[in-house]
Amino acid sequence: MIDYFAILSKAINGTQSTSAQARAETYQIARAALKKELSLAGSDLRADKAEQELAALERAILRIEVLIAQNDEGRAALQRLREKQRKRALDQDEVASDSASSERKSREVVILPPRRGIARTDHFHLEPRRRDLPPYEGKNVTIFSLPAETQKLPNFGERAAALFGETLRMAFVAMAAVALYVAVSEHDKGSDDRTATSATSKTAEAGQAGALRRPVPTGMPKPAVYGVYAIHDGQLIELNPVATAPVDPRLKTVFQITQPSVTRLATGLLKFVVYRRDLIVGAPEKVSIRVVARLARAMKFDGAGTVVTVPQRDTWIIRSGGYDFRVLPVSDDREMILVRPEDPEFAIPPGRYALMLNGQPYDFVVEGLVTDPAHCVESAPTARGPIFYDCPPK
């Protein structure tokens, strides 16, 4: 059964307007298209099957409307909550501003000098109100006063004790520095010994790493002419580049092929050899083998605005899915690379494929019964261009 919910969701999201009227028009178009499709099936389709398809479409419409209603209610509740929080914050700011201004108007601060001598500046404290001050009637006054005691100079005994403590601290620091120097020296000596004993093993490891970086010999058949080749049963079979065209101007990454493949291979146990001059500059890390799907049917709008289903012939779509093959250098030729799967026993399933190299497809067909649904697609129209989905199982 077709996933009507996915098709309708993409069609609604692709429209410029998501109003209830626009959605209703989309639903009517879908109903008309499905009824026409069921009528074309005629006697080949059972009556209960037709009713199931129509009921599935209505369930998808109801599900979309319920989700849209829930989203609208959630956004409205969130907006009401934000407005309530904004109003509460404004009220709190007004109350804080009024209290701060009244506090500044009513409070006065008085700082008194000390009574005797010069006091230490690190002994500020709050004193009770002195009796010799003039009255501050009707005012909120805070009085700060410096303490009266005067700092005394240290005597000879205090100076001697301080000098002895500083000397003792410097001696302790010097002893710690000497101990640290001895420990570091011993560690460096042990490191030199370990380095001397492990020089042979490090040299061997470096040689192994260099061997991994060198090109690996492949023992494969090598072409004499530039091109892209498939290695099939030990033989080289050249792959031809195929011309492509965009499916729709709005879909700049989806391309179609309008001609059949001329290269057919009996099995999918394949490797590929690419022999090109530009590989000296830089070779790709991986090469994609993309699925090329046959376009079976396309839903389109006719002149009256009705959706009609049109069978398609000789049209294939290059899909984004497929397989990524590894790239290995050839030991004695920098203009040649070997392309192979991670698993040497992997076989590409039957179907049509395109080896993508710098955006240019080289197509081929693996013969056999095609069972992967990705090799057959249908299309439906949207405001952003057609969408493609797998053909329903038969």
Image: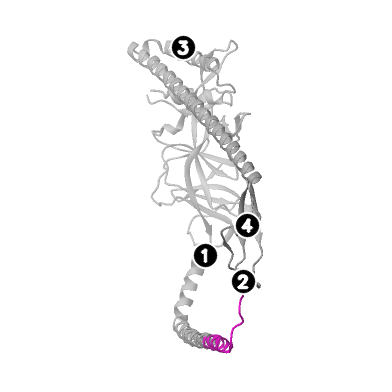
Q: Amino acid at mark 4?
A: Ile
Tag on residue 48? none
- Percent x, y of residue 87: 56, 31
For marks 3 and 2 on the same chain, the one whose residue lies earlier in the sequence: 3
Kind of element beneath mark 4: helix
Chief SS of the magenta region: helix
Residue nearest the viewer, comparing 272 with 263: 272
**Image label count:** 4
Residue nearest the viewer, comparing 321 with 387: 387
- Percent x, y of residue 330: 53, 59
For marks 1 and 3 on the same chain, the one whose residue lies earlier in the sequence: 3
Task: Name the residue tied to disc 4.
Answer: 280
Q: Amino acid at mark 2?
A: Arg
Task: Name the residue tied to disc 2.
Answer: 120
For marks 3 and 4 on the same chain, the one whose residue lies earlier in the sequence: 3
Kind of element beneath mark 2: loop
* Relative to 50, residue 16 above or below: below
Kind of element beneath mark 1: helix
Q: Count residues near mark 4 (Cα–Cα under 10 Å), then give few for <14, some for 14-19, many for 20+.
A: few
Badge nearest the viewer, 1 or 3: 3
Disc 2 + disc 1, Cβ < 8 Å:
no
For the point 49% across and 29% down, the residue is: 294
Badge nearest the viewer, 1 or 4: 1
The answer to whether residue 60 of the structure is visible from this angle is: yes
Q: Count residues near mark 1 (Cα–Cα under 10 Å), then give few for <14, some for 14-19, many for 20+.
A: few
How far apart, in angstroms, are the residues tagged by discs 2 and 1? 75 Å
How far apart, in angstroms, are the residues tagged by discs 3 and 4? 57 Å
Badge nearest the viewer, 2 or 4: 2
For the point 41% across and 16% down, the residue is: 58
Left or right relative to 53: residue 326: right
